[in-house]
Amino acid sequence: MSDLRFRSVEEASSRKAVKVELPKERVEKYYAEKVFNRQKMFEYLPAKTYEALVKAIDNKEPLSREVADSVADGMKRWAVEQGARHYTHWFQPMTGGTAEKHDGFIEHDGKGGVIETFSGKLLVQQEPDASSFPNGGIRNTFEARGYSAWDISSPAFIVDNTLCIPTIFISYTGEALDYKTPLLRALNAVDKAATRVAKFFDPEVKHVMCYLGWEQEYFLVDEALYAARPDLVLTGRTLMGHESAKNQQLEDHYFGAIPSRVEAFMLDLEIECHRLGIPAKTRHNEVAPNQFELAPIFEEANLANDHNLLLMSVMNEVARRHNFRVLLHEKPFAGINGSGKHNNWSLGTDTGKLLFAPGKTPKDNLEFIVFVSNVMAAVYKHNALLKASIMTATNAHRLGANEAPPAIISMFLGSQLNEILDSIEKNETDTILLQGKEGMRLDVNQIPELIIDNTDRNRTSPFAFTGNRFEYRAVGSSANCASALISLNAAVAAELDEFADRVERRLEKGENLDKVLLDEARRNIIFSRKIQFDGNGYSDEWKEEAKRRGLDTESSAPLMFDSYLSPSSVEMFKKVGLFTEKELEARNEVKWELYTKKIQIEARVLGDLAVNHIIPAAVSYQRLLVDNVYKVKELFDAETAKKIAGEDLKSIEKMAEHMSKIKQLVDKMISNRKVANKIESEREKAIAYHDTVAPLLEEIRYHIDHLELMVDNEIWPLPKYRELLFIR
Ligand code: ADP
Ligand code: MG
C-alpha cells in the first residue's frame, strides 16, 4: 500500500542538483531583457510616440488612441523579435494570484490568410470573459461587464513566448474588480496627501512615492513527495502529519549552508528574475527546515507588487525544472514556522527624501516625527481594518491560530524612537524647540540627530519601525501585497489629509508653522500611543493587555472582514476616493466566499484521506496485530500470552478508538458542511465554516497523527514530515 510513499522517498533522496546554465554575459547585459522598458520604448517607438508615452506615464495621463496604436506596433515588433507569439492582459483578480487569457497576434488578412498584428485598441483595452471571476455581485449590482485596461506605469514583459500586459480589471461603471485598481487609487491618494504635508517642509516637493520591498518566504518540497501527498497538491498544506522528531529546535537550518539542489534552484530563479527586471538580491535559509526567502531591492509599490506576483508564478515554473514544488501557503506544516511576506513600506519625495528616515537637521527630524506620528495614528485608528486586509483562510494559521501569535496589530518603534516620542509627549522638546526657534535657528539638540540603531529590532511585531521604513510583517506569503497596501496607504492618506487640514487652519490664524507641526504631531502621538507595543507579541499577557487598550483582538477571519464595513472604514475609504460602500460590500462577499471555499476543499480532502487512506492502513496493521494475538494465544498459556501480546491488545483497542473517532468526526464534518452550505448569506456561511467545520479539521488530524505513531512505518501510506522536510 505504501509503495508510492517509498518510491517517492527513494526518488527524492536520489536526486542531484540540476545544472544551471549560466548566462554568458554579465547581469547588466541581460537584466530586464524581457521587459519593454524605457530603453526598448526608445528603440522601438517613433520619437513622437516615445515622448507622448513617457509623458503619459510620468503625469499619469491616459493615452490617445493614435499613440496607443503606435505603441502597440512597436511593442509587437519587439515582442515578436523576442519570439513571442501571443499576448495577454495580465490582471489581478480578487481570488489572488494573477489571471491571463492568451490571444495570438494574428488577424485575417482579407485574402484567406492571416497577418501578424496588434492594435492599440487591443493593447489598451480588452474584455476578458470574466464571468467566472468572483466579483461579489458587483457586475450584477451595476449591470456591467468587466474590462481590462493597460496600466502604463507597469511595463509589459514576456514570459514563455507570451507578451504580458499588466492591466487593471474594472466594471464598465468603474468599480474595481481586482487588486491593482484600488492599489493605484490608494497610491494616488497617499501621493496627494503626503505631498501636502511634505510641502510644509519643502515647497519644491511635487510628488510622494510609496516604496515596497517584499521579502518572500517559501518552502520547497521534492516533487515526488509532493505528488504522494494529495493534501499538498489540493490545498497547499499538509492536513495531517505528526511532527518530525527533529524539526527546527536546533535552528541549524537557518545558520546552515543552502543545500546544493536548492542553491541551483535559487540561482536559476535569480537569473530568470533578472531577465524579467525583478531586482532579486537577497536569498537565505529561513528558520524552519526547507524554508527559504528571496528579497529584491525595493521599488515603487505598484511595480514591486507586480514583480512579486510575477515572481510567485515564475517560482513555480523554475521549481519544476529542479524537481521541486514551491509551497507559498502560510502554514504548510504544523509545528514549525509558517511563511510570511514582510512588506517593507516607506514614502519618499520626488526630491529624493525618505520620509520615515530621520535626518541630520532638526527640521528633517521634525518632518520625520510628523510622518511617523501620522502613521501611528492611522494604524491605531484602523488597526482592525489593517488586520482584515492581511487576513485570509490560509494566513489565519499564521496569525491567531493555536501555534501562532495572536491576531492583533500593534507597532514596534524601538527604544530610541520611543524616548523621542516620550520627550515630545511630555513637552520637553517643544520648549527647547521654541527657544531656539528665533530666526529659524533650530538647536540641533532639540530633536537630536536620530541615528536609529537597526539592531534594535523586535521579530515578533506585526508592524515594526526598522530605521527608515516600516516592516509590515503580518502579510501572508501567498498574498497579493496590494490588499495590505491598499488599506495602509488609504488610512495614512486620510490621516495626512486631516493633519494638513488642521495645520492649515492654524496657519490661517497666524500661528507659527514649526510650533503647529510639532503640536499636531504631539497630538497624534498622544492619541495613538496605545498602538505601540515593544514587548513579546507571542505572549498571552499581550492578548489581555491589547484588549484593555481597545485594540481589535477578533480571531475569527470571517468576522474580521466586518471591519471593512465599519463606519470608520467606510468613511475613510470614501474620503480618499477609494471605495464606495457598495464596492466594499461586494468585495467582502468575495472574501467570505473564498474563505468558505478554502475550508470546504480542505474538509473534503481530509475526509477522503481519512476514510480512504488512513483508516484502511490502520485497519491492515490492526489486522496484523489481531493475527499475532491469536497465534500467541494458541501457542502459549494465558498468562504468558498476556505478557507477550498484552501491549498488542492495548494497541488494537487504542487504534479502534482513534478510528471510530475519525469516522464520527468525518461524519460530523460532512453534516456540518451540509448545514452550512444551505446558508444563503456569504457572511453567515463563512462564519459557519469557521465555527463548525474548521475546528473539526484539527480534531480529525489529532487522531490521524496519533495513528501515524502507532501504525507500522511500512504500511503508512503518505510521506511523513521527516521525509518531506529535509532536502539533502
Ligand atoms: P531583513 O533584515 O528585514 O530580512 P532584507 O534585506 O531581507 O531585510 O529585506 C529588506 C527589504 O527592505 C529589501 O527588499 C530592501 O530593499 C527593502 N528596503 C530597504 N529600505 C527600504 C525602504 N526605505 N522602503 C522600502 N523598502 C526598503
Ligand atoms: Mg529578510
Image: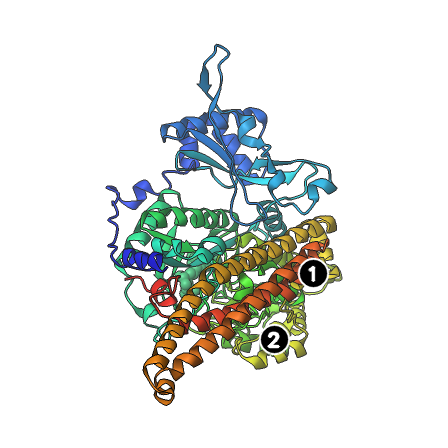
In the depicted view, which residue is nearer to us: 111 or 630? 630
Give residue 133's position: percent from left, percent from top: 60, 43
- Residue pictured at 29% horizontal, 68% vertical: 256
- What amino acid is found at the position of numbered circle 1 in the picture? Asp
State which quarter of the image contains the C terminus.
bottom left
Crowdedness near tag 2: few (<14), some (14–19) or many (≥20) residues, C-alpha within 10 Å: many
* Front position among marks 2 and 1: 1
Relative to 629, residue 68 above or below: above
Ligand 2 shown in quarter: bottom left
Q: Where, by quadrant of the figure, is residue 126 drawn?
A: top right
> Tag 1's secondary structure?
helix
- Residue pictured at 34% horizontal, 64% vertical: 723
Give residue 609's position: percent from left, percent from top: 48, 60
- Residue 7 seen anywhere in this rendered image of the structure: yes
Residue holding disc 1: 562
Report the colour scheme: rainbow
- Residue pictured at 36% horizontal, 60% vertical: 2
Give residue 129's position: percent from left, percent from top: 59, 34
| Disc number for residue 424 | 2
